[in-house]
Amino acid sequence: SCSVRDQKLKMTDAATPVAEPERMRQGDVAMELRHPLPTNPALLAISNYFGINRRGSTFATEIRAGITTFLTMSYVLAVNSRIISESGGPCECPAATIDDPACVFYDPEYAQCVEEFRREMVTVTALSAMVGCFLMGFGANLPLALAPGMGMNAYFTYDVVGFHGTGNVKWDVAMAAIFIEGLIFVFLTITGLRKMLVYYLPECIKTAMTGGIGLFLAHLGLQTAEGIGLVVADIATAITLGGCPEANRTYAMYDGLSADAYTCDNYPGSKMTSATTYLGIITVILIGVLLKRNIKGAIILGVAFACIISWFKNSKVSYFEDDVYAAGGGDGLSGGEYRWRYFKQVVKLETLEMSAGQMNFSSGSASLATALITFLYVDLLDTTGTLIAMTKFAGLMDEDGHFENENYAFLVDGSATTIGACLGSSPVTTFIESGSGIEEGGRTGLTALVCGVLYFISIFFAPILASLPPWSTGPALIVVGSMMMKAVTTIEWGDYGQAIPSFLCIVLMPLTYSIAYGIIGGILSYVLINGLDWCIDFAMGRAKFPEFEWQDGMPVPKQDRASNSSSDTPEAETKADAKIDGSESVAPMAPMGVPPGMPPHMMPPMGQPGQMPMMPGQMPAQPYMAPAMNTLAGGPPAPGMNTQFVYPMGQSADPAFMPMAGQPQMQHQGMA
């Protein structure tokens, strides 16, 4: 099939250089060139560096995927800056009110400092994301984007530092903890401990991570902070149907502070009356239709459609009207007016005077140690789950659960966290929104580079790019989440030792709002269920302890090594290479059951109608069945097939078709 495809490619345009089949090793994954190589030397060098053609992609696809990823996760510019700024950063009350601990709630100078810090955090967020994307693109060559993680920033602000600095750890001390956490993460990767974690994860849990993150993405896209507001909070059931306008929302209060979560229960008739919710639903349908019709850039077009409509003032879906979206505000202005004033600036560059280099290593406490450990294990599990899910979703993972440059990918995550702490950011991690770019076709690090370039541009155009309403990006999350759910079909749902842990891993991610908790739930249930089952078998004499041996610095069961080693042998690689480069067609293999001593050139090509040429006086031990593969597989004969040439297993051929001694042998020609 490779040779036929190559012939078709060469017939398309004789003047265009056509890529010969080339094999790329990713464990045991073999890929081939699918598109013509560029003629421009510079573009050819870029293509070779990133392996764009080897992974079946193009420059246009990678650029489009990078733009899609950026648009999907651009909300982080506004959301992360708002959350981190609520920690108060380095701001302190003036001398007149500093003796009052409650001054952070009412002092106007403190409030102005927090507002300036929030604007600065937009630049910090963009720089941290840019650095992470560049490192991932150049170093790991994966289509994954990084940015300050949602959830981790909330833990940093509300649990570690506290709202306006009312927690047990100061902001600069917490930044030092994040810096150290990034270094520990790098150490775990270099020493191979992180590799052991990935290796020993059950395969069903790795697969469930993809489905769980898909549900998590959809859950985010259905809520209000990052989505269309279709799902809201409920006092009795935790979540319920929403879609009520701003005027009918009752926001939750925690310790006297208003949260993003709200309920529509106080206005029963207001459900599904919000124009922004309907705009989000229409956008989901629009993206679905475009995808079904194979329109390139479907997600970008959907996001742009909802975004442009929402930028008009005095409408029911305007992002700049308080009765539509009242969150935010500053400088004495309401949320809508404040966003409108910021949006009209178009170009604005903020400094890093308040955030960069603000780390204090001289202080230590039990709270700091707890924060450090929490940052580490959540970041480790989140990153592991996201990388496994995204690479599997992109088709870059081999059958052994490995992907190309996986160590570099984890090094990038730890390094980006350390660099982000120097800039003043919460932990930087791989974003699950990268799935939107992968769905658009992104397969190489060029996708991450394009996203990084856009984050760099956003440093100057933050007023525009930070003004994408959540109901314009939420539909992209919903669509991508639906795409990721197809991975769960490979789980053995009939085996309860896999089904229950996989299910818990999937559902706990969106319901606990944490990838890490989902992974922990899946692993613990897997160990307990299968471990207790093994103990029962062991007590009954049906099981024994497996034998281990060291391989690549890890104890590996011998049966795993035996099963995996076959693909690493020179013979296996030779066969795989032959399969890709078409060399198998030079010497076709004889079908099973060909009589001994029969010359190969006398065999009819596989899949062609014809009679089985026999040596004089010989009967077939296992007759050749032609002409179609579906017949060989036990299916019905191919259309137009002469069924008298197909002999039932174990029966002799019709003597009328057997050549007699002295008669010329028939030689069949055809396309393999």
Image: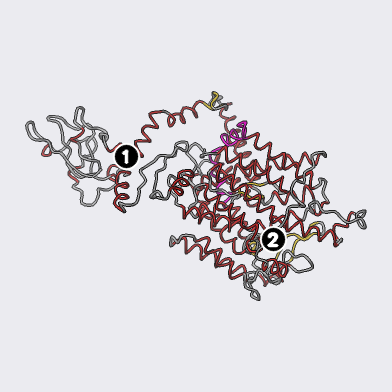
* Residue 201 tag number: none
Residue 259 falls left or right of residue 288: right
In the image, 435 versus 245, the foreground residue is: 435
Q: In this picture, is 231 found above or below 605?
A: below
Whether residue 230 is visible, yes or no, is no
Query: Which residue: 62% across, 73% down?
Result: 312
**Label 1 environment density (alpha carbons within 10 Å; few <14, some 14–19, many ≥20):** some
Residue at the location (71% across, 50% down)? 153
Q: Secondary structure at mark 2?
A: strand
At x 43%, y 60%, the residue is: 294
Measured in 3D between alpha carbons, the distance from the residue under mark 2 to the one under mark 1, in whole angstroms, is 59 Å
- In terms of secondary structure, where does tag 1 sit? loop
Residue 46 x, y percent position in the rendering: 48, 47
Q: Residue at x 32, y 47 (%)?
A: 5
Furthest-front residue in this view: 41
Q: Check if residue 33 falls in the magenta segment.
A: no
Q: Pointer 2: what residue?
A: 233
Amino acid carrying label 1: it is: Gly
Q: Nearer the viewer, residue 182 or 42?
A: 42
Q: Amino acid at mark 2?
A: Ala
Q: Nearer the viewer, mark 2 or mark 1?
A: 1
Mark seen at residue 582: 1
Q: Position of residue 292 (x, y in %)?
A: 45, 61
Q: Which residues are magenta?
A: 189-214
Q: Give residue 365's quadrant in the image.
A: top right
Q: Is residue 269 above or below residue 297?
A: below
* Closer-to-camera residue (370/92): 92
Is 411 located above or below residue 5 in the figure? above
Q: Residue furthest bottom?
A: 314
